[in-house]
């Protein structure tokens, strides 16, 4: 087999040497346009887990890499006049030039032909004369560009600027600096990669970059600027340059990674932000996977298909984590008002892959300090004693939280989950058992399913309501049980389905219109949800007055039923949400146009409900923070609308997303909506409830400790396990008081086998 590898960086070299090692009969050529020692950047980073993978793939190159590493165990965060230290991380730095030399030597030793300072002037010739062409030619891949119609690349160039410098200062830990200057905030990522050399990456926003005059600076001026700014940190050491020009990070995606006998490898296929140190790691792991697939399949097309099927999901998962990390650094200004401990914990868990429990395993003392800080804040905020001198602080999820007169004993919320099991809005024993069991399960707050303010406001014929007096009596039975038999509090989510109403129950066909018995629909504008959906009537003033009255009457009934909290549903494309999103509000009157107008009617309803709801009882509002569709809600809109809700008396914002328009393309993944909650909490300065694929108590602890939300709502986890919170407490060694009839379980140990 003849293999041409275009690109002599780590990806191409490592693939070539592994492929030759596995089958010496292969004719492998690496073609690189640059000199052997010509490389961008100074050091690369490997985790211990990545090094283990290299050990299994090729022992000689691994041994040479291992002998050249600068290892560190600590992360140092310089913030707020303090240096906060987190231990147990297990990373190593290596000179990029040294890595290339090791891979070049090993490739030559195995018989790989290396051709440097040679351009592939005609990619078509390489394609025609090789059995396999490996495009490892980096972010600006010419092979990918030539076959763009096959690979369908997408490149997202990020707004921040960064410059990759070196220094003679020998950092003894991975170090972060956050330096406020007269021009703005600079972030530094620094780490040692050999005894007398370190990488020193400086990042900032575009406006800071321009105010500092760095848009007009050459390499020498850039070095001089930062030697002066960081003089006290560098302690007389110099900064070094190596093609140290300012860049904007490009996030590369490709719809497909192979086309015929051509396959993309490393940065040509994907990039992930340097803040999680992933570029070289991904490139080398790509090479291992591709060589494995070539060995496992007889034909090149089959091998390339297998490689993409195996490798792409793993890369996408890491890219999602890198994207969240990237956004943290793009918006670091947002976090500068945090307490140093909270800031550091937010930094360390920024990718959402590192959790409270993971850090606890690495550095128990550091996490105990974090937990004590969270507990102290909770004690001050709630007025409930939390911190005990003779006991460890509780896990963050088991700290109390106050909303007006309502004090929740922990941060876990049972998210609203439609049951579609009511008759003309009236709930029955199903709802008593469903909500009652989850209250017994230990959550601090249980919120009912979407409860409609009128028969015409239901999603389906099976939806719950509070539009008749007997509805309040039925709900009272549930509320009384929760209050009498558990320590949970219970809230009701009031809503009107709008254009998403008159549909079948979930298991009969979600969002599909009723074939019989449908009722007329209302919305901000006369736009059907689906092409086959009923066309709603655009609300006029009389409609608005009637719906507002319906909400007010439902709120009064909610108080009669004894609910502790009302949540106003302004999300997911239902009636109030349809006014907020520009995709569903096409009005030209005072209720359409800018966000201030689009919020006019939702705020009118909120004010009317707040006026009749007891002053000491809190109100939550659930929103869709993004439409996940072009032309939808902007970040500025989001911050503005949450600020309006706060000013009108909303006590907490339940930050959900999407479901406003069927064209939306959600970015699903673990904790995928948590960054939106964090944005609202810090930018709009209002407490939040996070929701969206929160999977574990480690996730909840991480979210609360990092200040990404004040409460965490879980839906499917509570469907699967009504006692989720109690089980989380048991696994963490936290004592929760069980109901008297269940006391015998306090010393029970579950054995699965």
Image (cartoon, helix red, strand yellow):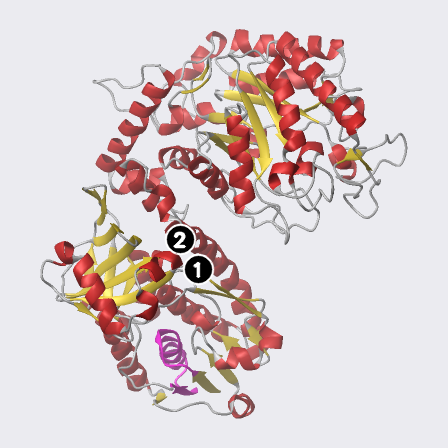
Residue segment shown in magenta:
6-32
Decide whether residue 744 is among the magenta residues.
no
How crowded pointer 2 is (Cα within 10 Å; few <14, some 14-19, many 20+) is rated as some
Q: Position of residue 388 (x, y in %)?
A: 25, 17
Which of disc 1 and disc 2 is earlier in sequence? 1
For residue 476, side relative to residue 346 (left or right)? right
For residue 114, side relative to residue 607 (left or right)? left
Image height of 156 relative to 333, above or below? below
**Splitting the image into 4 quarters, where does residue 473 fall?**
top right
Circle 1 — which element? loop
Along the line of sight, the residue nearer the viewer: 36 or 680: 680
* Residue with the most extreme right position: 516
Question: Which residue carries the number 1 mark?
Answer: 159
Q: Do the residues under discs 2 and 1 have CB atoms within 8 angstroms? A: yes
**Splitting the image into 4 quarters, where does residue 111 fall?**
bottom left
Q: Position of residue 268 (x, y in %)?
A: 47, 73
**Splitting the image into 4 quarters, where does residue 197 fall?**
bottom left
Question: Which residue carries the number 2 mark?
Answer: 330
Circle 2 — which element? helix
User: Going 61% across and 27% down the picture, which residue do you hit?
Assistant: 416
User: Going 38% across and 82% down the picture, which residue do you hit?
Assistant: 20
For residue 698, side relative to residue 89 (left or right)? right
Along the line of sight, the residue nearer the viewer: 36 or 678: 678
User: Going 64% across and 7% down the picture, which residue do you hit?
Assistant: 560
Decide whether residue 7 is among the magenta residues.
yes
How crowded pointer 1 is (Cα within 10 Å; few <14, some 14-19, many 20+) is rated as some
* Residue with the most extreme left position: 236
Q: Is residue 241 visible?
A: no
């Amino acid at each position: 087999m003849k293999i041409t590898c275009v690109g002599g960086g780590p990806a191409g070299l490592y693939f070539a040497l592994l492929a030759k090692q596995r089958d010496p009969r292969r004719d492998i050529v690496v073609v690189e346009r640059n000199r052997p020692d010509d490389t961008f950047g100074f050091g690369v980073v490997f985790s211990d887990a990545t090094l283990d993978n290299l050990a299994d793939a090729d022992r000689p190159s691994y041994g040479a890499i291992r002998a050249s590493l600068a290892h560190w165990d600590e992360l140092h965060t310089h913030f707020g006049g303090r240096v906060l230290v987190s231990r147990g991380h297990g990373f190593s730095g290596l000179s990029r030039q040294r890595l290339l030399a090791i891979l070049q030597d090993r490739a030559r030793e195995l018989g790989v032909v290396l051709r440097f300072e040679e351009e592939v002037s005609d990619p078509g010739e390489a394609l025609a004369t090789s059995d396999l062409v490996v495009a490892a030619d980096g972010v600006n891949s010419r092979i990918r560009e030539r076959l763009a119609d096959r690979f369908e690349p997408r490149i997202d160039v990020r707004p921040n600027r960064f410059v990759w410098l070196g220094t003679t200062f020998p950092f003894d830990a991975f170090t972060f600096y956050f330096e406020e200057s007269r021009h703005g905030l600079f972030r530094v990522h620094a780490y040692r990669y050999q005894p007398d050399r370190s990488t020193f990456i400086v990042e900032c926003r575009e406006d800071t970059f321009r105010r500092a005059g760095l848009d007009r600076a050459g390499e020498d001026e850039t070095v001089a600027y930062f030697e002066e700014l960081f003089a006290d940190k560098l302690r007389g050491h110099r900064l070094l340059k190596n093609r140290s020009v300012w860049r904007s990070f490009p996030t590369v995606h490709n719809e497909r990674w192979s086309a015929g006998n051509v396959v993309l490898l490393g940065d040509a296929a994907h990039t992930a932000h340097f803040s999680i140190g992933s570029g070289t790691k991904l490139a080398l792991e790509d090479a291992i996977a591709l060589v494995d697939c070539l060995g496992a399949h007889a034909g090149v097309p089959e091998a390339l298909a297998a490689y993409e099927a195996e490798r792409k999901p793993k890369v996408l998962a890491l890219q999602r984590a890198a994207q969240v990390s990237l956004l943290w650094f793009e918006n670091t200004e947002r976090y500068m008002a945090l307490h140093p401990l909270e800031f550091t914990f937010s930094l360390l868990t920024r990718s959402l892959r590192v959790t409270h429990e993971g850090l606890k395993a690495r550095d128990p003392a550091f996490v105990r300090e974090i937990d004590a800080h969270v507990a102290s804040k909770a004690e001050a905020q709630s007025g409930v004693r939390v911190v005990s001198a003779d006991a460890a602080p509780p896990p963050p999820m088991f700290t109390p939280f106050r909303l007006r007169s309502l004090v929740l004993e922990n941060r876990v919320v049972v998210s609203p989950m439609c049951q579609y099991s009511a008759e003309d809005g009236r709930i029955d024993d199903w709802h008593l058992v469903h909500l009652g069991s989850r209250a017994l399960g230990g959550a601090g707050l249980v919120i009912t399913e979407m409860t409609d303010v009128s028969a015409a406001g239901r999603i389906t014929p099976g939806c719950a309501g509070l539009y008749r007096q007997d509805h309040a009596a039925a709900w009272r039975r549930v509320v009384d049980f929760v209050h009498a038999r558990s320590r949970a509090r219970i809230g009701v989510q009031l809503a009107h389905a709008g254009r998403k109403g008159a549909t079948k129950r979930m298991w009969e066909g979600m969002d599909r219109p009723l074939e019989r018995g449908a009722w007329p629909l209302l919305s901000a504008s006369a736009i059907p949800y689906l092409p086959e959906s009923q066309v709603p009537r655009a609300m006029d003033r009389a409609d608005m007055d009637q719906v507002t009255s319906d909400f007010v009457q439902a709120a009064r009934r909610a108080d009669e039923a004894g609910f502790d909290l009302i949540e106003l549903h302004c999300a997911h494309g239902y009636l109030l949400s349809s006014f907020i999103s520009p995709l569903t509000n096409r009005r030209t009157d005072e209720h359409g146009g800018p966000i201030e107008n689009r919020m006019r009617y939702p705020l009118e309803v909120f004010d009317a409900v707040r006026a009749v709801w007891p002053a000491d009882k809190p109100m939550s509002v659930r929103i869709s923070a993004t439409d996940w569709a072009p032309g939808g809600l902007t970040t500025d809109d989001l911050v503005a609308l949450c600020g309006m809700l706060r000013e009108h008396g909303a006590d907490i914002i339940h930050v959900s997303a999407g479901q406003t328009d069927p064209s939306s393309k959600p970015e699903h993944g673990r904790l995928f909506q948590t960054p939106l909650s964090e944005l609202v909490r810090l930018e709009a300065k209002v407490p939040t409830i996070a929701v969206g694929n929160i999977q574990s108590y480690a996730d909840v602890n991480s979210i609360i400790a990092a200040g990404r939300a004040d409460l965490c709502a879980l839906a499917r986890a509570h469907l699967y396990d009504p006692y989720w919170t109690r089980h989380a407490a048991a696994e963490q060694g936290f004592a929760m008081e069980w109901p008297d009839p269940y006391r015998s379980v306090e010393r029970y140990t579950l054995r699965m086998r």
